[in-house]
Amino acid sequence: MALSEAVSPPRHIAIIMDGNGRWAKNRGLPRTAGHAAGAETFRRIANHCRALGVEYLTVYAFSTENWKRSEEEIAGIMRLLGNYLHEALRDMEKNRVRFRFFGDLTRLSPELQKLCQEAQTASSDYDVQVNFCLNYGGRDEIVRACRRFAREVAEGKRQPEELTEAMLSGYLYSADVPDPELIIRPSGEMRTSNFLLWQSAYSEFVFMNVLWPDFGPADLDAAIAEYHRRNRRFGGV
Ligand code: IPE
Ligand code: IPE
Ligand code: MG
């Protein structure tokens, strides 16, 4: 039975798109070829999410730690992102997806920053939202939120005692986005690698033994089915 017939999907799915390098290595290809295949998978999975009625899709595309990679690999990833954003801007009316970017974009090239800005602005009226995590780190996001709050305290606009969990959430990149119910990590690794540390407090994690370029709609359906088998207690009984 297709999942779409069976159950409604979570409102917000987040994915750590991992395993591109190993996929390429297994084929004797350069790592960048894995990233190109991974970008194709993203297109397919984003379409599938939209067809299922997922409202928010957050994808980890480049972490604050990924700058440790070779210049060549980083340039390849950035080129693929640029290509994707050009295409997204071209097909905006057809796809009707709202783009948001989580992360410190100032470290990206001016061209890429401009494309991100354009994609975000041009798509602001659409409903289904894709959050691209670019130069994103969960710890970095929390530190930035703390700095913003501290600045407001120093300026006399806020009192330290005023700070609540909800208020801190409002300083994050994800300010107006509900927490993800489901976080999927393909590639066999079982760690968060600094993804959505605050927002994942009660997310269900599904780790899968498939490399991201091989991840298909059926894998997403399987992850959602697994999510529906979980008993979410939120600390209750
Ligand atoms: C994920 O795939 C893509 C990025 C981190 C940019 P990897 O490149 O980490 O692939 P593996 O983990 O080396 O296989
Ligand atoms: C996490 O994958 C980051 C992205 C998928 C963008 P990594 O490949 O960078 O994580 P580690 O190094 O396995 O923890
Ligand atoms: Mg990896």
Image (cartoon, helix red, strand yellow):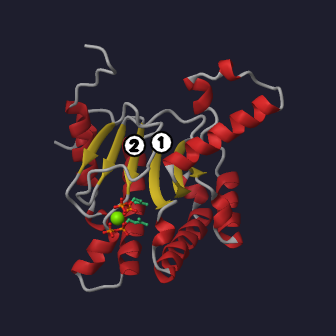
Mark 1 or mark 2, which is nearer the start of the sequence?
2
The residue that label 2 is drawn on is 13
The reply to whether the C-beta atoms of the residues labelled 2 and 1 are less than 8 Å apart is: yes
Q: Position of residue 68 (x, y in %)?
A: 47, 71
Residue, far top:
237
* Residue at image coords 62%, 32%: 170
Quarter occupied by residue 93: bottom right
Residue, far left:
1
Quarter occupied by residue 47: bottom left
Picture layout, residue 220 above or below residue 165: below
Q: Is the CB atom of the residue marked by disc 2 within 8 angstroms of ligand 2's nearest atom?
A: no
Q: Position of residue 42 (x, y in %)?
A: 40, 61
Report the front residue among 223 and 183. 183
Left or right: residue 21 compared with residue 126: left
Q: Is the CB atom of the residue marked by disc 1 within 8 angstroms of ligand 2's nearest atom?
A: no
Left or right: residue 14 compared with residue 138: left
Report the front residue among 170 and 33. 170
* Residue at image coords 66%, 18%: 161
Name the amino acid, label 1: Tyr
The residue that label 1 is drawn on is 56
Q: Position of residue 160 (x, y in %)?
A: 69, 23
Residue 173: tell me if it is visible.
no
Picture layout, residue 51 above or below residue 37: above
